[in-house]
Amino acid sequence: MQAFILAGGFGTRLAYIVKDVPKPMAPIGRKPFLAFLIENLKNQGIKEIVLLTGHKSEQIESYFGNGSRFGVNIQYSVETSPLGTGGAILKAANLYLKNDNFLVLNGDTYFDVDCKLLMQFHEENQAVLTIGLKYKKDVKRYGNVEISGSRVSRFTEKNPSLEDGLINGGIYAVHKKALSYFEKRETLLSFENEVMPLLMKQETILGIPFGGKFIDIGVPEDYSFADQVLKGWQKQKKIKAAFLDRDGIINKDKGYTNKLSDLEWVDGIISFLKKLARLKYQLIIVTNQAGIAKGKFTEEDYLSFQKGLTICLKKEGIIILDSFYCPFHKEGTVKKYTKNSFLRKPNPGMILEAADLYNIDISKSIMVGDKASDRILLPCLKSYILKGAYPLPEGFPIYQNFDEILEGLQNG
């Protein structure tokens, strides 16, 4: 697999902090930001790298050379005059492209994505372009990427009215067919603002959300944050999680359950959770709580019940790593909670938020629920749906009990 890294940035907004170096060479401790990207690729077995350089390219070439001392093979595609991101990709592909599909990464963005999973999804779906997407609670600075299933349906430019959603994570799987949409010209050509919208009109662009650590060093405050955390991120080991719906899976669903006096365990759940823990899954609750938006109980009521439930499980020898909830619903009666939110299942917002916080490998994790909304819209997450009180669509895979789920889990 080849990875093309866009490393020609001027770093204008960082100029008064990081002087006289290209933006990807901004130092993080004793090594440049770009070194972290290259190390991350190498650790995933990706060793064929093309650096798309321009501004002060000689500094990048002097530091990285042919890549041998970093355990990779590096080639350079150098802009003699600014081409824009689209022009730089086209030039590099014409010089060095070896395979039908290749990766493109922004050289000023660290996004801990499983590149092999991204490429596998891209190739299996015979996509022209697949974007690695990142969930953010506030997308005003980045703009928003809307998806329908896995198909990118809309790009929304950055604006102050945006709230939570998916952003372009700056990592792409690209088929060489896409290159026919890159206009060869002398002036700047933007991959993000010109090529991608054109591609979306003519071809199906796919997007896959990931929950990995993310930082864009394009602004001073994020560069300073990267300087504090990036070394620690790379040393952090990934874990696997069992994401659990609450009402109907852990406690019996009595309709907007929010009082500890109503707490009653679902049959078999204590044994099931202990077995999941023995299989090295970290236990995390992810629950839609539309009752908050509909005025059935308050957010404080939810938090009090959740705390009591967690304490009761601990007495049974079960540790809940964390709990995530969505208080929003588009048909709410409490104004501040009345809206669509990407946190609400089957959207994967809560899963992605947890994965970021705890460095979870989603592809090795599972979701257990009892409703159609618990089948999370995330291609790399396996969902197990338990037969319960809620009707499920015809043909929906259903497990009769927790033992069946365990059997399905152990059989892959």
Image (spheres, rainbow, N blue to C red):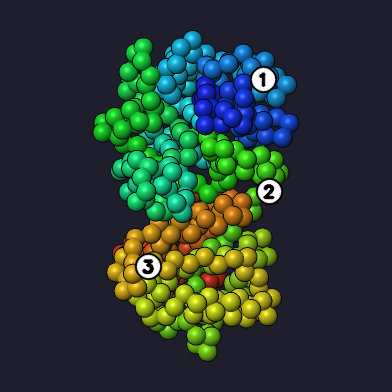
Residue carrying label 1: 64
Q: Which mark is residue 315?
A: none
Residue that appears at 73% across and 21% down: 69
Amino acid carrying label 1: it is Phe
As rendered, which of 232 and 267 lies closer to the eye? 232
Hey, which residue is sitting farthest left in the picture?
201
Drawn side of residue 400 relative to residue 61, left or right: left
Residue carrying label 3: 336
Residue that appears at 41% across and 51% down: 165
Which numbered disc, 1 or 2, marks the residue closer to the eye? Answer: 1
Question: Taking the image as drawn, is residue 8 in sight?
Answer: yes
Residue carrying label 2: 237
Q: CA distance from mark 2 to mark 3?
A: 37 Å
Q: CA distance from mark 3 to mark 1?
A: 51 Å
Of the numbered discs 2 and 3, the one sitting upstream in the chain is 2
Looking at the picture, does residue 154 appear above or below residue 288? above
Amino acid carrying label 3: it is Lys
